[in-house]
Amino acid sequence: MKFNTKTIHGGQSHDKAYGAVMPPIYQTSTYAQSTPGGHKGYEYSRTHNPTRHALENAFASIENGSYGLAFASGLAAIDAVIKLLQPGDEVISTNDLYGGTYRLFTKIFEGFGVKFHFIGMENADNIDRYVNQNTKLIWVETPTNPMMNIIDIKAVSRVAKKHNLLLAVDNTFATPYLQRPIDLGADIVMHSATKYLGGHSDVVMGALVVNDKSLAERLYFIQNASGAVCGPQDSFLVLRGIKTLHVRMQRHCENGKVIANWLSKHPKIEKVYWPGFEDHPNHAVAKAQMADFGGMLSFTTKGNNYAEAIKIVERLKIFTLAESLGGVESLAGHPASMTHASIPKEEREKTGVVDSLIRLSVGIEDVDDLIEDLSQAIE
Ligand SMILES: *Cc1c(COP(=O)(O)O)cnc(C)c1O
């Protein structure tokens, strides 16, 4: 089955009771048993729920994995991955990382004795010198947020295999429409399904997909034992979202490309960060591992003025000034005052998050309207 068919049919079967084409929302916490242990495969909804199960099968299918797991949020999914580890274990992570992931690693799991190294992985050979006998996991985000750096997943997976480490990839920005990390050598794919998989800014949810049976069993155990599962209503919504992932992503990419090019020619714009440009430092890797370049981009204005950037995002009318990304509607964010405000100015500027940086999640509206909106906001 090809990807555009998997989004609609992958791992799905019609409802056995009445033939419902969409899985019913099994809004139930428990299931009747005829005799102790005599059930139809479902006992308690933290452990299993048929609506969630249908969604988990869809997650596995679109990521070319064998096992999918759905969680209450993206961070709950990441939390489950780190719970595979023990005190004393070490993780090597990309340094340009989603802020909530960084917070979970440093403020929660460092307190439990897990050690994290945050490093640049644009060159995968960098990783070797941080590996020791305690290293268990490599954590990768690509493209990164908000600087749109690209990490070569295949190259990192070679390092992971050489040292017998697990490789987890946060595939939230790219989605399996653009890149499938398991095919590139990753062991675990993670999603904030809140973003493109849900696609309509109406659900908070997380996902994991793996291929290895024993790894899947350990993660299912953690999912049930820790209990950060999503409800049946949200499962239904994300399953519905996935059915249009390929058509939405196609338009996100088309609109993203037009806007990136328009911004790059604008006299008031200093720099546009988008992996589709030939002068992007890892354009060749992006071209090789991604089917297209996505709908996320960032830009800075000439003069790098904080107040001017704030004015631009305030003037936008079709783009909504908001956290998050990946919905059908266009969103804009100002990292220095929003997502990255808690990072000291010198620290954030080291990774490129300067005062005038604005991040766009380009939606699927008519691109002419989006450009008109940006144009009046920047003038
Ligand atoms: C939003 C996001 C997360 C966290 O997901 P939640 O669903 O908000 O918990 C993790 N990684 C990336 C790249 C994200 O954009």
Image (cartoon, rainbow, N blue to C red):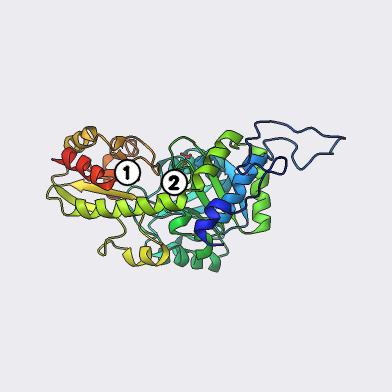
**Label 1: few (<14), some (14–19) or many (≥20) C-alpha neighbours in 10 Å:** some
Q: Is residue 97 above or below residue 161?
A: above
Query: Could you say where residue 170 lies in the image, as x and y percent from the top left?
Result: 47, 51
Quarter placement of the C terminus? top left
Residue 185 appears in the picture as rendered: no
Residue 202 appears in the picture as rendered: yes
Query: Could you say where residue 271 lies in the image, as x and y percent from the top left?
Result: 20, 52
- Mark 1 belongs to which amino acid? Glu
Q: What element does badge 1 sit on?
A: loop
Quarter placement of the N terminus? bottom right
In terms of depth relative to the viewer, which is nearer, 149 or 180? 180
Q: What element does badge 2 sit on?
A: loop
**Label 2: few (<14), some (14–19) or many (≥20) C-alpha neighbours in 10 Å:** many
- Mark 2 belongs to which amino acid? Tyr
The residue carrying mark 1 is 365
Residue drawn at (41%, 61%), measured in percent from left and top? 290
View quadrant of ligand 1: top left
**Residue extending furthest toward the right:** 35
Horizontal relation, residue 277 to residue 206: left or right:
left
The residue carrying mark 2 is 196
